[in-house]
Image (cartoon, rainbow, N blue to C red):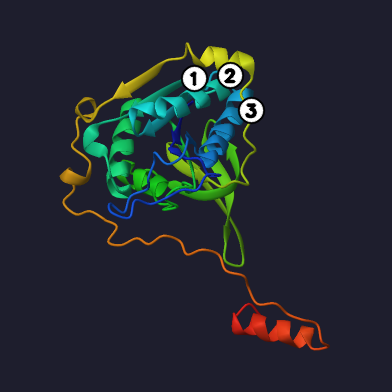
Amino acid sequence: MKIVVLAKQVPDTWSDRKINLETGMLDREASEPVPDEINERALEVALQFKDANPDAEIVALSMGLEDTTKTLRKLLSMGADSAVLVTDTALAGSDMVQTSRVLAAAVQRIAPDLLVAGNEATDGRGGMVPAMVAEILGWPVLPSLDEVTITAEGVSGTTQVDGGSLSLSSGLPAAISVTEKSAEARFPNFKGIMQAKKKPMETWSLAELGIQAGPDAAPVRSVMVSAEARPPKEAGPKVVDDGTAASQLAEFLAAQRLI
């Protein structure tokens, strides 16, 4: 079994993330870059299968700037066997469609049995890349799984839908995305950190993938047409209990359509 885990390097989720109001793009130099937490949980799902099946191989795959190797090294220290970074100056500013085209081409080259990803990145929250990659590959996709079971024959899990939960299953190859409920990511230990320095990491360009991609290569593209800074927080209304506090609170909730 070969499993590819998609990874993304994002600005620290605890930092004050900012959008460049001129370009409409996220300012990735405003805070320390870190591995997206949801990708660590996706890796944990794959690692739990590997714990029970030592012959399984896990490849961490990312598209980004050259310093994305920092994120991949952490995933290697957690237990991934190898890593691949697709980086090219032509990819700067790529939207989800172009990103998915590149990742799908890399997945085809790696030729895994299963693709595991987080359900949405914490910087963009588009939530569509795993499904787009699966569409390009012609694979079934099991989205936003809270629970996952992987076997040599297939993958299954449950996802939340309006009014309940849905059980999904598929043979291989397949793609899945997982939620934060799927697994609690393990911490890399000292041995894992030292081993990560020796594990293989390849860097691929668009030329090596044999495709043209990125904003300039797109026949159509999505762009940010406007962006505004988040307004400062303001104090909410205060309810003074003069004997009518309950009715005041009920009226406020009703006005906000919360009840």
- Picture disc at residue 187: 3
Mark 3 vs mark 2, CA separation in Å: 19 Å
- Where 5 sits versus 22, above or below? above
From the viewer's perspective, tell me whether residue 74 is left or right of residue 128.
right
Find residue 73 and report its horizontal and vertical position in percent: 48, 23
Q: CA distance from mark 3 to mark 1?
A: 16 Å
Vertical arrangement, residue 97 with respect to residue 80, above or below? below
Q: In x, y percent, where is residue 25? A: 33, 50
Label 1 vs label 2: CA separation?
11 Å
- Where is residue 115 shown, x and y percent of the image? 44, 36
The tag earlier along the polypeptide, 1 or 2, is 2
Percent position of residue 117, x then y: 47, 40
Secondary structure of the residue carrying tag 2 is loop
Q: Is residue 123 above or below residue 188?
A: below
Badge 1 density bin: few <14, some 14–19, many ≥20, Cα 10 Å: some
For label 2, the residue is 54
Callout 2 amino acid: Pro
Neighbor class of circle 2 (other Cα within 10 Å; few <14, some 14-19, many 20+) is few
Foreground residue, 135 or 27?
27
Residue at image mark 1: 81
Could you tell me which residue is drawn at 21 percent across and 36 percent down? 90
Residue at image coords 70%, 77%: 238
The residue lying at 28 percent from left, 51 percent from top is 23
Q: Amino acid at mark 3?
A: Phe
Residue 128 is labelled as none
Q: Secondary structure at mark 3?
A: loop
Camera sees residue 109: yes
- Give the number of the mark in front: 1 or 2: 1
Look at label 1 and name its amino acid. Asp
